[in-house]
Image: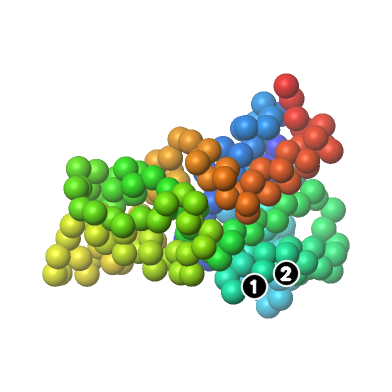
Amino acid sequence: MICRYTLLTEGSTDAALLPILDWTIRRHTNQVFSGEFAYRRGQGLAEKIRNALEDAPCDLLFIHRDSDREEPFRRYEEIQAALTEAKVEQPSVCVVPVRMMEAWLLFDPGVLRQAAGNRNSRATLNLPTHAQLENIADPKTVLREALRTASERRGRRLDEFNKQIPAAMRRITQLTDDFSPLLRMSAFQRLQDDVRAILEARNWREE
């Protein structure tokens, strides 16, 4: 039997999280899951959650919120309060990167060059080290600039590429087979722990 999960995010670019969730689930279970992305519609988070479950019914719900300038625990509290208000019965997992989701897309320069459509690029991307990823103030800007640099486009061709950057961001995770370098990041490790706990509680964790 295939179980279904739904990912509710802050924007369409965050659909890049789907391959990360697929990889995470495969680490902890042989149970097959099929994931679906839900667009946020509604006013408050509780309404968005209810609408997401109506649009994409599931066995497991993931809710993504970036920390931005807040402490991550504040986002967990906001999500838990919204789940209670929405009276959600499905098991749910919070996905709360420190700062922004884009920090999780900066660890592999080779994949980033492929996503920019220029796998043979030799341009210096000036990416942060793995240890620095959670301390970047604006990872979205860092990622956009790295993709622009990797594309090695100029002038009008660069202007055209700027419009393709959201799609390039999504390609990064589609092209990545192994996200284990992110395990040293606290928010990513918490996601792993929370998924494993849910799978165990629901007896979805097949050895």
Numbered disc 2: secondary structure: helix
- The location of residue 82, given as percent across then percent down, is 78, 68
- The location of residue 190, given as percent across then percent down, is 68, 49
- The location of residue 35, given as percent across then percent down, is 60, 44
| Picture disc at residue 97 | none
Q: Mark 2 and mark 1: span between their CA atoms?
A: 7 Å
**Camera-nearest residue between 122 and 204:** 122
Numbered disc 1: secondary structure: loop
Rendered position, 110 above or below 62: above
> Total label count?
2
Give the color scheme: rainbow, by chain, secondary structure or one colour. rainbow
In the rendered image, the quadrant that contains the N terminus is: top right
Q: Are marks 2 and 1 in contact (CB under 8 Å)?
A: yes
Asked if residue 132 shows in the view, the reply is yes
- The location of residue 94, given as percent across then percent down, is 70, 56
| Picture disc at residue 70 | 1
Q: Name the residue furthest left.
A: 155
Rendered position, 41 above or below 30: below
Query: What residue is drawn where x is 46% and y is 49%?
Result: 130
Q: Name the residue furthest bottom.
A: 43
> To which quarter of the image does residue 157 belong?
bottom left
Rendered position, 94 above or below 5: below
Query: What residue is drawn where x is 31% and y is 64%?
Result: 145
Q: Amino acid at mark 1?
A: Glu
In the rendered image, the quadrant that contains the C terminus is: top right
Asked if residue 38 shows in the view, the reply is no
**Which residue does the numbered mark 2 point to in the structure image?**
74
